[in-house]
Amino acid sequence: MVQPVPSSGVVAETKAGEEDALSDRYPTKGAFDRDNLKESPGFYTRAWRKLRKDKLAMFGLVMIVILALFAIGAPIVSEVTGHDYARGNYAKVKAPPFEDTENILGTDDNGRDILTRLAYGGRVSLQVAGIALVAALTIGLAVGAIAGYFGGAIDGILMRLVDIIISIPSITLLLLLSVWLRPGPVGLAFVIAATGWTGVSRLIRGEVLTLKNRDYIDAARVMGGSNWRIITRHILPNVISIVIVWASLALPSLILTEAALSYLGFGVRIPIPSWGNMLDDARGYYMQSWTAAFFPGFMIFMSALSINLLGNGLRDALDPRLSE
């Protein structure tokens, strides 16, 4: 006997009943509505959330902010202490710290207030390191991106230039340039950058070599994108995370380089203070007043340590292989 075929209306009612039964058991009404959908956090948002969980990295960030505010507020520190960084009081030569409220951290061999000179010295040291970082990063990005993207003879010439600069002892080259040019703080930053860009250029070149053969780069070429547009709009944005990590790890070495040159007498020259030449100045009388050498050395140590801690945290947060 042939079974009667149910009408379309009966089938629709049956499906509707089944859907209502499922919705009662598994309440998902509106779950896929556009208004209820939540945007997935981006790469840098996830990195920031991971960075916030790293206590050492956050400690480094807080210390960097404190040191930066201390250096930027050097004129305010001078007004509070009532002292200038260049003029001293010969009635209070080599005064110990915490002896009176007029010179909280004591004075140097010329009677100059150490706290005031630390603030101005931090401004100069961080300024030199910051400008050197930007200059080295600009040169390294340009050289690395051009060498990696074009390859061939251009890559060979640029990488041989990098090899030549690396083969020369950096401190020797820096001393030679400092004696030859006798630069001020800004000029010293460019002198330091002249030898500090080689590492990031090789890093960028290696990354560009892997990116230039990706499908989206081929698609940009097919659509008529110029080499300049492909490099600046499609390749460089994908190496930003590597650049951030390199910059955070290179900045402490630039601070130490400036301090070393100033300590040797080839960097920032008196009467302009920097943490390096404050150490050089305290070298002659540290047995009588060890704190005059301790305070600038401690500032160099804390700045380098804080930036390194933050750099390690950024490296872990920006590495997609370590994402949770």
Image (cartoon, rainbow, N blue to C red):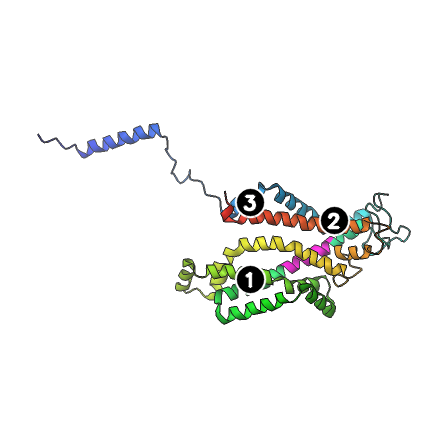
Name which quarter of the figure residue 58 lies in. Answer: top right
Return the x and y of residue 284 as percentages of the image width and height: 84, 56
Is residue 127 at least partly visible in the picture? no
Label 2: which secondary element: helix
Q: How crowded is the residue under tag 2: few (<14 C-alpha within 10 Å), some, or many (20+)?
A: few
How far apart in space, not on screen, are marks 3 and 2 (Cα)? Answer: 29 Å
Side (left or right) of 111 relative to 300: right
Side (left or right) of 229 relative to 99: left
Check the image and report above or below for 289 versus 195. above
**Residue sitting at x 60%, y 55%:** 247
In the picture of the structure, the residue carrying the numbered disc 3 is 48
Return the x and y of residue 74 as percentages of the image width and height: 75, 51
How far apart in space, not on screen, are marks 2 and 1 (Cα)? Answer: 33 Å
How far apart in space, not on screen, are marks 3 and 1 (Cα)? Answer: 27 Å
Q: Amino acid at mark 2?
A: Phe
Return the x and y of residue 61 as percentages of the image width and height: 64, 46
Whichever of callouts 3 and 1 sits on the residue coming sooner in the sequence is 3
Label 3: which secondary element: helix
In the picture of the structure, the residue carrying the numbered disc 1 is 202
In the picture of the structure, the residue carrying the numbered disc 2 is 298
Q: Do the CB atoms of the residues marked 3 and 1 lie less than 8 Å apart? A: no
In the depicted view, which residue is nearer to us: 233 or 60?
60
Q: Nearer the viewer, mark 3 or mark 2?
A: 2
Q: Nearer the viewer, mark 3 or mark 1?
A: 1
Q: Amino acid at mark 1?
A: Arg
Query: Which range is magenta?
Result: 122-133
In the depicted view, which residue is nearer to us: 61 or 258?
258
Check the image and report above or below for 159 versus 95. below
Label 1: which secondary element: helix
**Residue sitting at x 55%, y 45%:** 48
Whichever of callouts 2 and 1 sits on the residue coming sooner in the sequence is 1
Is residue 14 at least partly visible in the picture? yes
